[in-house]
Amino acid sequence: MSRYEILPCRISHLRELSKTMRAADRAEIEAAGLVPRHVLMQLWRDSIDPKAALIDGEVAAAWGDAAPLLSSEGNPWLFTAPPADKVPVLFFRVAREQIADWLRIRRIIRARVVASYVCSLRLYRMLGFEVSDPFPLGPKGELFCEIVMGDR
């Protein structure tokens, strides 16, 4: 059985994740015309309580809410690495718990996901998010979907 920990996210976790993140997560960031390690650092700086999940000592995921503290609308982010595949049920349960925590302080949470990242969109649907039709975004007009949960 794999050993897991959920910790406050540190810069060292982001450095590791920027090297090991799933290709689809990297492609999503690059589709928006951005650099993965820069995006991770910016989201981490903007988040009040970012978290990292370690599976058997390896960074499996990092996430947070990059919205301003007093905003009623959250801006969740999540990036993963292959170790997350070792514990899919746990990963889903932790995601559900985190979303519930955000919705206690936010009226709504919303983010964008590149439309080609089918397994990510499937996960968000399973978690209860509404997924919009694709729309062009970024310098190359890549198609993205908005994911939304909460009271509108």
Image (tube, rainbow, N blue to C red):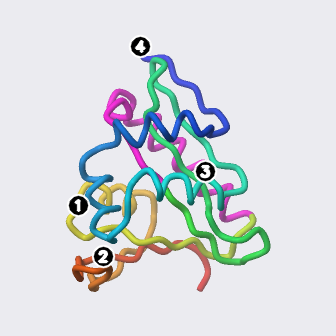
Local crowd at mark 1 within 10 Å, few (<14), some, or many (≥20)? few
Are dots 1 and 3 in contact, CB under 8 Å? no
Displayed quadrant of residue 6: top right
Residue bearing the label numbered 2: 144
Say what amino acid the circle numbered 2 marks.
Answer: Phe
In what element is the residue under mark 1?
Answer: helix
Displayed quadrant of residue 10: top right
Q: Does the magenta stretch include residue 147?
A: no
Say what amino acid the circle numbered 4 marks.
Answer: Met
Residue bearing the label numbered 3: 98
Are dots 1 and 4 in contact, CB under 8 Å? no
Q: At 28% across and 80% down in the image, what residue appears?
A: 139
Q: At 43% across and 17% down in the image, what residue appears?
A: 2
Q: How far apart are marks 1 and 2 (CA)?
A: 11 Å
Which image quarter holds the N terminus?
Answer: top left
Q: 130 or 140: which is nearer to us?
A: 140
Magenta segment, prevailing SS (helix, strand or loop): helix
Q: Distance between the residues labelled 3 and 2?
A: 23 Å
Viewer-nearest of labels 1 and 2?
2
Which image quarter holds the C terminus?
Answer: bottom right
Residue bearing the label numbered 1: 118
Residue stretch rendered in magenta on the structure = 78-104
In what element is the residue under mark 3?
Answer: helix
Q: Distance between the residues labelled 1 and 3?
A: 22 Å
Residue bearing the label numbered 4: 1
Viewer-nearest of labels 1 and 4?
1
Mark 2 or mark 4: name the one nearer the start of the chain: 4
